[in-house]
Image: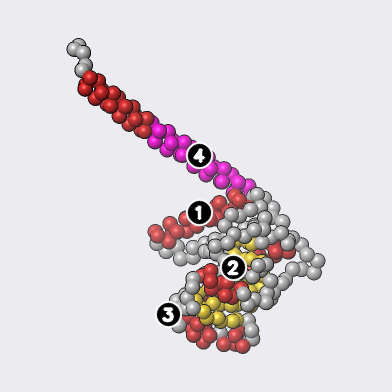
């Protein structure tokens, strides 16, 4: 084999470095994805085990002498929800919780959300069971803050304007606040109109991304996020319901 001249030796070195870098990159990517798959699978298994344990364990609800039935405000921020607002209010009125006030916050809707609600429930408004507020459009968080700033109740429950709650939902949320260490309670959100492939996929997403993980975290008495799409209860300590601020109290059972 004839000897390489200086130019050919430099070309060989460049080829050697290039092939080494390419091989290293390929091995690195394959190893990285392999480790990622292992970690994701292990996390899924652990979350599943924790969620199953939490599902099977007996839940303890604080007991208070004479019962714990504080006044509660149910906040419903709404934006262009004239088609569903009546149904949502009706589901809250059907609640079995006795000391309840409903507050609908019309977030600058361009339709007849406020008018439809007032026309459907004039007696409830006159009796003080239902209050309808209107503010300029600023988003859900600002609408909630607007209502919370004028609350007389210590506790509030927030639901979306297209959400229907069970009759015992508020009762099951509020009872946990008998423990003063509880700062927020997350409900169990489900998709009601599972009528086609897309809504069934959404229902599966809710189970895996919200309910499944929250149940696992509840085993350790902590929930990192109280989702906006779920029924959620809160204790009015700081007078705001800022969506950009985290809840600072240690325990938040689902």
Residue at mark 3: 110
- How far apart, in angstroms, are the residues tagged by discs 1 and 4? 17 Å
- How far apart, in angstroms, are the residues tagged by discs 3 and 1? 33 Å
- How far apart, in angstroms, are the residues tagged by discs 3 and 4? 48 Å
Mark toward the start of the polypeptide (3 vs 4): 4
On whether residue 52 falls in the magenta region, the answer is: yes
| Residue found at the very far left of the displayed protein | 2
Residue at mark 2: 241
- How far apart, in angstroms, are the residues tagged by discs 1 and 2? 23 Å
Mark toward the start of the polypeptide (3 vs 1): 3
Nearer the viewer's eye, disc 4 or disc 2? 2
Q: Are marks 4 and 2 in contact (CB under 8 Å)?
A: no
Mark toward the start of the polypeptide (4 vs 2): 4
Q: Is label 2 in a helix, a strand or a loop?
A: loop
Q: Which portion, as a residue range, is magenta?
A: 27-54
Nearer the viewer's eye, disc 3 or disc 1? 3
**Residue at 39% from the left image edge and 59% from the top image edge:** 197
**Rendered location of residue 252, percent (x, y):** 64, 57
On whether residue 7 falls in the magenta region, the answer is: no
**Rendered location of residue 124, percent (x, y):** 60, 84
Residue at mark 1: 209
Numbered label attached to residue 39? 4
Nearer the viewer's eye, disc 1 or disc 2? 2
């Amino acid at each position: 084999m004839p000897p390489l001249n200086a130019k050919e030796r430099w070309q060989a070195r460049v080829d050697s470095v290039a092939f080494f870098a390419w091989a290293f990159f390929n091995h690195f990517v394959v190893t990285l994805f392999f480790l990622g798959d292992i970690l994701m699978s292990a996390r899924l298994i652990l979350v599943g085990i924790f969620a199953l344990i939490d599902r099977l364990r007996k839940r303890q609800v604080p007991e208070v002498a004479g019962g714990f039935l504080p006044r509660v405000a149910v906040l419903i921020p709404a934006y262009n929800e004239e088609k569903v607002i009546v149904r949502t209010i009706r589901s809250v009125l059907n609640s079995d919780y006795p000391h309840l006030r409903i507050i609908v916050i019309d977030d600058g809707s361009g339709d007849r959300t406020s008018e439809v609600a007032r026309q459907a429930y004039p007696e409830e408004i006159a009796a003080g069971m239902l209050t309808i507020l209107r503010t300029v459009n600023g988003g859900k968080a600002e609408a909630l803050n607007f209502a919370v700033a004028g609350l007389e109740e210590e506790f509030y429950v927030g639901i979306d304007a297209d959400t229907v709650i069970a009759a015992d939902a508020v009762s099951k949320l509020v009872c946990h606040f008998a423990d003063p260490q509880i700062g927020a309670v997350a409900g169990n959100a489900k998709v009601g109109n599972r009528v086609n492939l897309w809504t069934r996929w959404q229902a599966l997403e809710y189970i895996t991304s919200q309910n499944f993980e929250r149940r696992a975290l509840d085993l350790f008495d902590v929930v990192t996020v109280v989702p906006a799409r779920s029924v959620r209860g809160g204790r009015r300590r700081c007078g705001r319901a800022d969506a950009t601020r985290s809840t600072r109290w240690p325990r938040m059972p689902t």
